[in-house]
Amino acid sequence: MVAHQSVFSLISYDRLSKKPLLFKSFTGLTIVEFNDIYDKEITKRYHKHESKRLSKRKDRERSIGAGRRFKLDVKDRFLMLLVYYRLYITYTLAGFLFDLDQSNICRDIQKIERLVRKCIPIPQKIYNITKRLQTPDEVEAYFPGFLSFIDSTEQSIPRPIDNKRKRKLFYSGKKKRHTVKTQFMTNNHGIIVYKSNYKKGKRHDYDIYKKNHPGTPKEVVNVFDLGYLGIEKDFPEQKSSLPSKKKRNRELSQQEIEQQKSF
């Protein structure tokens, strides 16, 4: 079940543990703390976690453990998840650092994240906190400049096999491949305030927002791109800002061009 292939990556436990200061900077843990959590928590719970995860599939045809192997061992996947959350890097950069493609990064993080959350606090949605903000000072602490930025990102996944409906639902016409989408809200300092669950690649960004969107205090201006056209009409109770759309036979003014550059 835990077999893995050998890969050469820029970051691995063996390489990073030789540089204690970088290790702490990249993961938020000292090497001793990391090893203690891995040995006493991750290793102890991993087998049960995987058995439970794999047994949830009702359409399973192969025996548990007979599927595709992870390319990284458990320790390096634990390290990768900490680096991903600590540095807020993209899947593309994580893939480069750990010598994996984006679909593997997405898959590996998704499958070990629940286990790691049981063993150590890692960044979570703080949307519930933002709903309780009351004074302007509290709001600005989370949203400097009273601004939030909302957009979705797509990560490639392996083409679903023997399931035509799944292939259709996960196929992104924009990316021309099968993907999953994640919607983020960040503040003016680039800190992630909200992160949605993974959504099927076929779904439009605005459709994801309408069905599962984060709320913000009334003082905060939510900044969107043109993929969210109609949001000002559909959500008049919140402050929204979109770039100007170029109309037929009319050039954008210099002010509108500068405005678009800021999105």
Image (cartoon, rainbow, N blue to C red):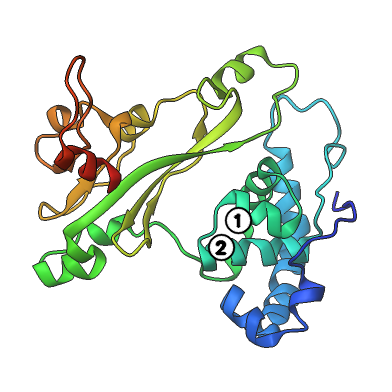
39 left or right of 30?
right
Residue assigned mark 2 = 117
Q: Is residue 41 visible?
A: yes
Badge 1 crowding class, 10 Å Cα cut-off, few under 14, some 14 to 19, many 20 or more, is some
Q: Amino acid at mark 1?
A: Glu
User: Is 225 left or right of 170, judged from the image as shown?
Assistant: left
Amino acid bearing label 2: Arg
Q: Residue at x 64, y 81 (%)?
A: 22
Looking at the image, residue 25 sits to the left or right of residue 222; the answer is right
Q: Nearer the viewer, residue 62 or 144?
A: 144
Against 203, is 11 above or below? below
The image quadrant of residue 27 is: bottom right
Residues marked 1 and 2 touching at CB (< 8 Å)? yes
Q: Where in the figure is residue 124, as x and y percent of width and height?
A: 44, 60
Which of the pair 53/141 is nearer the observer? Answer: 141
Task: Tell me where residue 80 sits by quadrant.
Answer: bottom right
Which mark is on residue 58? none
Q: Position of residue 40 (x, y in %)?
A: 72, 76
Quick one: 223 or 185, which is closer to the camera? 223
Q: Residue drawn 90% across and 56% down?
A: 6
Image height of 53 relative to 202, above or below: below
Task: Please name the residue that numbered disc 1 is placed on.
Answer: 113
Q: Secondary structure at mark 2?
A: helix
How many C-alpha atoms fall within 10 Å of the one at disc 2: few (<14), some, or many (≥20)? few
